[in-house]
Image (cartoon, rainbow, N blue to C red):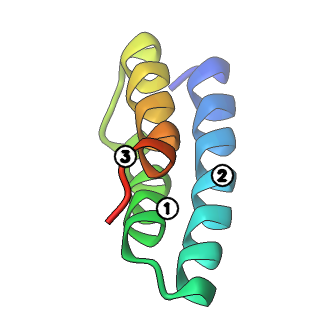
Amino acid sequence: MDTASLLWGLLFGSVGLGYFIYGKNQKALLPALCGVALMVFPYFVSSIWLMVVVGAGLMALPFFVRF
């Protein structure tokens, strides 16, 4: 792991925690699941570019998908 992956992981984990708390308080399933995914996926992705693309997609998902 290098510095960039640690910082991106910290950023996505922090946003994921916010999404999870919001989803839990509002009883909204999608933000809560995206929050958990944002907190967990940096452990499994080693490429920086892939981490940024997947993280940005997971952060944008609750804004575009409503159910």
Q: Where residue 65 appears, x then y in whole percent? A: 36, 49
- Residues tagged 2 and 1 counted as in contact (Cβ below 8 A): yes
Q: Amino acid at mark 2?
A: Val
**Residue at x 46% of width, y 52% of height:** 62
Q: Which residue is mark 2?
A: 15
- Rendered location of residue 27, percent (x, y): 49, 88
The disc, 2 or 1, on the residue closer to the chain's N-terminal end is 2
Q: CA distance from mark 3 to mark 1?
A: 10 Å
- Give SS at disc 2: helix
Q: Is residue 23 toward the left or the right of residue 65 in the image?
A: right
Where residue 23 appears, as percent x and y from the top left, is 54, 76
Q: Is 56 located above or below residue 11 in the figure? A: above
Residue count near mark 1 (Cα–Cα under 10 Å), binned few <14, some 14–19, many ≥20: many
Vertical placement of 2 versus 28: above or below?
above
Residue tagged 1: 35
Inspect the image, locate mark 3, and give the three-letter code of the amino acid beneath it: Phe
The span from disc 2 to disc 1 (Cα, nearest Å) is 7 Å
Q: Between tags 2 and 3, which lies in front?
A: 2
Is residue 13 rendered to the left or right of residue 7?
Answer: left
Amino acid type at circle 1 is: Gly
**Mark 3 or mark 1, which has the lower sequence index?**
1
Find numbered disc 1 in the image and state the secondary structure of the residue it sits on.
Answer: helix
Nearest-to-viewer mark from 3 and 1: 1
User: Is residue 47 shown left or right of residue 3?
Assistant: left
Q: Report how far apart the C-alphas of labels 2 and 3 lie in the structure.
A: 13 Å
User: Badge 3 is on which residue?
Assistant: 41
Question: Whole-percent x and y of residue 3?
Answer: 67, 22
